[in-house]
Amino acid sequence: MKRGSITKTGNAHLRRIAVEAAWSYRLRPGVGPALRKRQEGVPEEIKEIAWKAQHRLHKRYIRLSATGKDKRKIITAVGRELLGFIWAIGVKSEAAVKQQKAA
């Protein structure tokens, strides 16, 4: 399957934030004290998605890096996939809010 190149359509600020966040996936996944504190009160389902994202995106970075890809392209690919996880978390939390309003 041939994929097209990354376009510069959409929100430039969001694209920049996603790429900056993607750089952190070079490092091994972990939940430090600061992250643990930020996650207080967050539903377990969302924490699971976030943990799965950490592992998957780190593995993707390592895999693409091992093939000799350009670091900037790797980060762009990881950032794009990161947005997919953010979307999934948004959908889950929106569904939870709707469910609370219905109850």
Image (cartoon, rainbow, N blue to C red):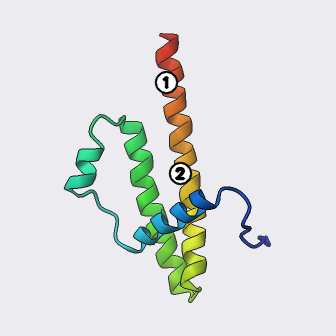
- Residue at coordinates 23% horizontally, 58% vertically from top-left? 32
40 relative to 8, above or below: above
x and y percentages locating residue 34 in the rendered image: 23, 54
Task: From the viewer's side, name the closer residue of 27 and 60.
Answer: 27
**Left or right: residue 18 compared with residue 30:** right
The amino acid beneath tag 2 is Phe
Task: Give neighbour class at mark 2: few <14, some 14-19, many 20+ (Cα, 10 Å).
Answer: some
- Residue at coordinates 56% horizontally, 86% vertically from top-left? 67
**In the rendering, which numbered label is found on residue 62?**
none
Marks 2 and 1, how far apart at CA: 18 Å
Q: Residue furthest top?
A: 103
65 relative to 76, above or below: below
Image quarter for residue 64?
Answer: bottom right
x and y percentages locating residue 57 in the rendered image: 48, 65
Q: Residue furthest bottom?
A: 68
Q: Earlier in the sequence, mark 2 or mark 1?
A: 2
Badge 2 element: helix
**Left or right: residue 52 compared with residue 80:** left
Count of picture labels:
2
The amino acid beneath tag 1 is Val
**Labels 2 and 1 touching (C-beta < 8 A):** no
**Left or right: residue 42 compared with residue 20:** left
x and y percentages locating residue 27 in the rendered image: 36, 73
Q: Residue furthest left?
A: 33
- Residue at coordinates 53% horizontally, 58% vertically from top-left? 82
**In the rendering, which numbered label is found on residue 85?**
2
* Quadrant of the frame with the N terminus: bottom right
In this view, the mark in front (2 or 1): 1
x and y percentages locating residue 31 in the rendered image: 27, 56
Task: Give neighbour class at mark 1: few <14, some 14-19, many 20+ (Cα, 10 Å).
Answer: few
Disc 1 target residue: 97
Badge 1 element: helix
